[in-house]
Amino acid sequence: MRTPSYVIALLLAFAALAGASSAWARPPVQAFASLPRVSDPSMSPDGTRFASVEEINGRPGVIIRPLYGNGQAVGIPSDDWIIWGVQWASNDKIVIMAGKGTKMPGGRELWTLNRAIVIGADGSNPLPLLQNVKGLASNSSGVSIVDVALNDPAHIYMQLFTLDSRGATLDVYQVDLATGDGARFMRGSRNTAGWIMDGQGHVAARIDRDDDAEQLWVPRGEDWAQVAQAGAADGGLRVQGLTTDGAGIVRVNKAGKRTALTRIDIASGQETVLLADPDYDIVGAVTDDWSGRVIGALADLGGSVGGKYFDTRRQDDLARVIRSFPGFSVQPISADVSGRRQIVGLGNVRMPLAYQYVDHDRKEVSEIGSTYPGLAAADLGEMKPYDYTARDGLHIPAFLTLPPGGAKKNLPVVVMPHGGPDAHDSLGFDWWVQFLANRGYAVLQPNYRGSTGYGEAFNAAGHGQWGLKMQDDITDGVRKLIADGIADPKRVCIVGASYGGYAALAGATLTPDLYACAVSIAGVSDLPEMIRYERRVYGRNSDAVSFWISRIGSPSDDSDKLRATSPARLAANVKCPILLMHPELDTTVPIEQSELMEEALEDEDKPVTFIKLEGDDHYLQLALTRYQMLTELEKFLAAHIGR
């Protein structure tokens, strides 16, 4: 139902927070573990419908709904493939992207295969794409759309690795949406790692990558010219897209102590600063849904991400919506071709993200769906900054979520370092954190050195510091909580996933007297073995291996350090119970990492429980997996730090 004006939206915003009290309900695990009711909604080019990834029978599926009128919703479920994305190819067709972990014939390691299908917006005529391309069956790519080219509704452009007598190259294919067949449109070099197109079916640039760096190449007649280069260990070129006039290429690059958006002139190769801020990192660009061209910037505000459009009219539209929802973050999500109809995300730390349809010309707004409609603000914890100073004087940004009800002292605490580690936690709703807060635990999320979002120097300070200063930062946060009287020193558990899982195991082995328990989900336990895995899968001199070495150290030059900071080799130090959980189809951190830790702990007769999460990958994309994880976690925490 349409809301007549932005003003009415204010009432809805305040109502969402009404009713908070000292008593709170404990929603069932399913209320937190279910997949988001609506996720990543994408508006059709004409603005009449939207498609989103939603839960269907416990798995990610796609649902297409009308934005107004009485049309019927169309549901598209998944089978054993996990749907992770959807994109409009035209007003009446969408492309669905899905992945599945599998072993290649005769192979040792799991690979995540990704595929794409085109299907009618009414759910008709599903058609796999690129099936005619030789070698697709053993290709882990095959889903990356580089140009929807709305000027040609019969085709899209995708990039795909092709193996022929010249070796493997990443090529651009023109894909016929009527047949699904692809025809090679542009051949890459042996080092090509990505393509940039102009939104109208023309190649604008390509990105090549060798062992140490990425290079940006642009067409010069029948030839190519290199116009920029960046080290792979520094994140590469971080290209965002073309400028709106098509004359420049935008990327994220250093500008003093911060990162900024810079513009590389295609004709001259000269690089200039497009947008910078002395206080915040510019972490990315806002791009047009249909042309892919850069129309704005994204800044990390130290606790949330803020967007700004370059176009005055678009920015005024966004500012009007923001003013209508004080106390809420407003995120642009998708728009039609005109940009006048838009989907935005609305949320805050005690309100799960809700998506709103906005008609800027008519100044109307209506909700199209909430991510977690079964949760109420009164049942969620209060999240606030909790910065502190590390032992060497470095400022550590952090967030503390207290359980609902008002208790602030002598609490059981879950320390939850984020994954990555090149990532960061920020102010906002998190289903996992809020589940723990609802169950009565305070949750500390430290943005230890090595996190992104706080400047290049802060990120670089974590290089080579796994288990060392990065771990000290986490330890210092716990000690601050204890000193402030917030944490009961006998009821602190460290819990994390991916790198956070490593940090949990490092906490239990390097500071064994600090924690009453530890939980690792898909965590790394043996650093030398992890490097060996990366080399087997991606190649000894791959950019993936180069990145790992830049973050943890060289297995030849730093072998003693890597062994001394590998929890699986320090199991004898453990004094607390440990829970290990690992998805069986994880290709980011192989399940062998948890198996190594389990074996090491059992050899030392230490208390350990290992649970294999069947059928899921590193990112816990199935509702059943999330339910199992939260259920086991709740039981484990209650046994060891609960009242």
Image (tube, grey):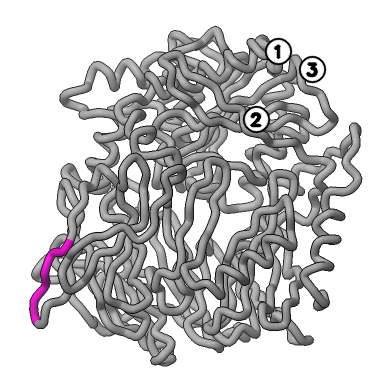
Task: Give SS at disc 3.
Answer: loop
Q: Which residue is mark 1?
A: 485
The residue closer to the viewer here, 611 or 471, is 471
Q: Which residues are magenta?
A: 222-227
Q: Which three-letter amino acid code belongs to the residue tagged 3? A: Arg
Task: Give SS at disc 2.
Answer: strand
Q: Measured from the top left, where is residue 392 in percent x and y?
A: 41, 15
Q: Measured from the top left, where is residue 511 in percent x and y?
A: 49, 11
The answer to whether residue 352 is seen in the rendering is no
Q: Which three-letter amino acid code belongs to the residue tagged 1? A: Gly
Which of the two labelled residues, at mark 1 and mark 3, occupies the earlier sequence position?
A: 1
**Which of the two discs, 1 and 3, sits closer to the camera?**
1
Quarter of the image that includes the C terminus = top right
Which of the two labelled residues, at mark 3 and mark 2, occupies the earlier sequence position?
A: 2
How far apart in space, not on screen, are marks 2 and 1 (Cα)?
Answer: 14 Å
The residue closer to the viewer here, 49 or 115, is 49
Q: Which residue is mark 3?
A: 643
Residue under the image location 53 percent in, 41 percent down: 302
Q: Is residue 224 magenta?
A: yes
Q: Which three-letter amino acid code belongs to the residue tagged 2? A: Leu
**Which of the two discs, 3 and 2, sits closer to the camera?**
2
Q: Is residue 551 left or right of residue 211?
A: right
Q: Measured from the top left, where is residue 424 in percent x and y?
A: 49, 40
Q: Is residue 478 magenta?
A: no
Q: What number is the disc on residue 400? A: 2
How far apart in space, not on screen, are marks 3 and 2 (Cα)?
Answer: 20 Å
